[in-house]
Image (cartoon, coloured by chain):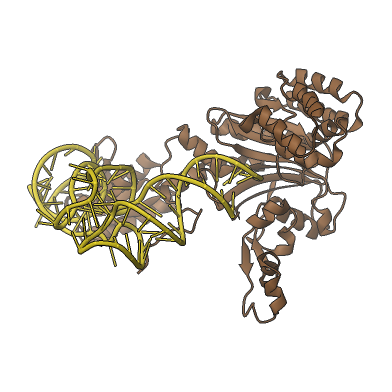
Amino acid sequence: MQKPSNARGTRDFGPKEMAKRNYVFNIIRKHFEQFGFQAIETPAIENLSTLTGKYGDEGDQLLFKILNSGDYLSKLTDQDFQEGSKKFTYKVSEKGLRYDLTVPFARFVSMNRYDLAFPFRRYQIQPVWRADRPQKGRYREFYQCDADIIGSNSLLNEAELITLFQAIFNSLNLKANLVINSRKVLAGVVDVLGMNEHFVDFAVAIDKLDKIGWDAVAKELIEKGFTEEQCAVLAELILFEGNNLAKIDKLTSFFNGNTQGLAGLKEIQDVLGFIQQNGFVNTNIIFDYRLARGLSYYTGLIFEGKAIDIPFGSIAGGGRYDNLTTDFGLPNMSGVGLSFGIERMIDVMDALNLFPEIPFSGSKILFAYFDEAGQTQAFQYVNELRKLGIPSEIYPEVAKIKKPFEFADKKRIPFVAVLGEQEMAQNKMNLKNMESGEQELLSLQDLMEKIK
RNA sequence: GCGGUUGUAGCUCACUCGGUUAGAGCACUGGUUUGUGGUACCAGGGGUAGUGGGUUCGAAUCCCAUCAUCCGCCCCA
């Protein structure tokens, strides 16, 4: 006997949790399909070579690696052992669990390039795994819901994804801001300062602004080689507050003709222009040139969704990537994607009490009886109802009548039909409404009419 | 990977300085009620105090290790 427990950072979902999860999944799936995205799935297990090098050093460390089958030590030499665990890992492991849905998607597109209709829009709702240290809102196994459009450079695609974001969050009654920026804007800022080679340092530091404040960010920048003067110039830009238009003006003068920066700004303007036409209220789309995002493969517009009423980190994220499929032998295939962090969305909705009353038992009616004769009759009736598409169940045992009632109460089944001697003598049943407590004597015909 | 926190019944939590048989609420089981759940009353089951070691006459309590948890860092959805 061992004490049962979940593996670290993983969770079970009982019927109650599943009802909530499916509620959210179904809404997201419905919108994905409304926007013309097609479902695909890829395996949980990928070749490790597919995954490594795509998420940076940190990401490689967070990959779950699968030990080779068989005698995985047989071909190793003493030297392999001495090279340390980092290199050693790749000698005993050739497969790993997927870390996100975007990289496997890039592999998929690359492999199926001649069969897909481009621009290809796919959605994918599957779990991913990260060997991260679990915390609140951070799990080692969690679902991602991704929508991507690949094979088109048009900024209309960015606008489509933003519209999709608005549609989904509207349907869920979840208030969120979608912050957008362009990697090109960030690159432009760095370019103006003449610090091109420090782009990543800059992006990583600036991304923490919300959390640690400008002073700490500036300190980090200086540690990475930026000068006090450069930070002073940056401060003037970074600390600027204003609406989307004001920020665009501010940047235009800051860029002072810098081509890269202005190209990024044009992207933002074009996308915002589209969004104004989409019929959704555009107030929750915020251009913020301080948004950086970690994943290294983004090259153009980047998105990040954040809940408004509660601080919870990002609950959606994405962006444009120009070179993801290049590693898989397919260059010039630009794509843009948006990933919905469904686990966090559910956590946020739970915290804000946004879930409607969701029945977690599908059955409308439970049949109860006292003896074998009733059981036989009930079995007949329950299947009649099922044929009509009414979800129904039958209590499986002859027991005290209290039992099926308690059972129905616990599962919140709204009706219980009792088949006793008296009822069956008239070819009827006693139907109890579990909420009101009312009871009435009905034939199967009456019942079908009533519950339909 | 680093720093801290917590770990007692299925769940939420008590147990004074280390001292008898570790308690409560909720949940569960049975009964009051052999044709009725959600209310009430009565009774009952359930614990190797995360795990392993140490100190002590004696450990839930003190010490060490380990595992898990939550919080922060890194990073991320």
> Chain A shown in which color?
brown
Give the quadrant of the N terminus of chain A. bottom left
Q: Residue at x 91, y 31 (%)?
A: A259
Q: Looking at the image, which is closer to me, B51 or A372?
A: B51
Is A211 placed above or below A118 here?
A: above
Across and down, in percent, residue A403 comes to: 23, 52
Tell whether A186 sits left or right of A209: right
Outermost residue on the bottom side: it is A74
Is A43 placed above or below A67 here?
A: above
Q: Tell which chain the image draws in yellow.
A: B
Across and down, in percent, residue A376 comes to: 28, 61
Q: Is residue A415 visible?
A: yes
Splitting the image into 4 quarters, where does residue B39 fall? top left
Q: Is residue A167 visible?
A: no
Q: Residue at x 55, y 36 (%)?
A: A312
Give the quadrant of the C terminus of chain A. top left
Is A281 placed above or below A388 here?
A: above
Is B2 placed above or below A65 here?
A: above
Across and down, in percent, residue A249 comes to: 81, 19
Q: Looking at the image, which is closer to me, B68 or A383?
A: B68
Across and down, in percent, residue A287 comes to: 73, 27
